[in-house]
Amino acid sequence: MPLHTLSLPPNSELLESCARLISDEDSLLLLGDGIYASVVGSKYLNLLDTINCKIYALKEDCDLAGLENKISKGVAIIDYNGFVSLSAEHEKHIPWD
C-alpha cells in the first residue's frame, strides 16, 4: 500500500493515470500545487472523487495558497506531522510529478 503524492498543478491526464493505478488501500497526498485539485468547484474534483482511497491535503500548502476553507470535505487536511506519520505507515512512495 503505497503513499502517492501529487505536487504539480493538476491536469486531467496525470489524475486519470493516478486514478487508474491507485488502489483502495493506498493513500493520496496533495501538496504544493497539487492541492488545487481538491478545491470545491475545481474541474479536477470530480476526477478526484473517482479515487476510492484516502485523500489528504497538506495544511501548510492550503494555508499558503489561501485555500484552507475551500478544500472539499472528502479530503482530509493534515499538517507536516501527519505527513511524516503517513510516510511511516506506507511501505513505499509514488510521486506523481
Image (spheres, rainbow, N blue to C red):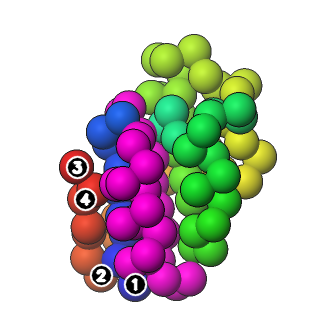
Question: Does residue 52 appear to the left or right of 80 in the view shown?
Answer: right
* Proximity of marks 3 and 4: CB atoms separated by less than 8 Å: yes
- Element at label 3: loop
In the image, residue 10 sits, relative to residue 16, either above or below, namely above
Front position among marks 3 and 4: 3
The residue sitting at the front extreme is 13
Residue extent of the magenta highlight: 10-34
Front position among marks 2 and 1: 1
The disc labelled 1 sits on which kind of residue?
Met
- Element at label 4: strand
Residue in front for this viewpoint, 31 or 47: 47
* Proximity of marks 2 and 1: CB atoms separated by less than 8 Å: yes
Front position among marks 1 and 3: 3
Q: Which residue is mark 1?
A: 1
Q: Mark 3 and mark 4: span between their CA atoms?
A: 6 Å
Q: Is residue 25 magenta?
A: yes
Q: Mark 1 and mark 3: span between their CA atoms?
A: 19 Å
| Residue 69 lies in quadrant | top right
Front position among marks 1 and 4: 4
Q: Which residue is mark 3?
A: 97
Q: Residue at x 63, y 66 (%)?
A: 50
Earlier in the chain: of badge 2 and badge 1, it is 1
The disc labelled 4 sits on which kind of residue?
Pro
Q: Mark 2 and mark 1: span between their CA atoms?
A: 6 Å
Earlier in the chain: of badge 1 and badge 3, it is 1
Q: Which residue is mark 4?
A: 95
The label on residue 91 is 2
Residue 4 % position (x, y): 36, 64
Please rate how many residues cluster around mark 4, counting C-alpha atoms within 10 Å: few if below 14, some from 14 to 19, many from 20: few
Earlier in the chain: of badge 1 and badge 4, it is 1
User: Is any atom of residue 74 visible in this view?
Assistant: yes
In the image, residue 92 sits, relative to residue 79, either above or below, namely below
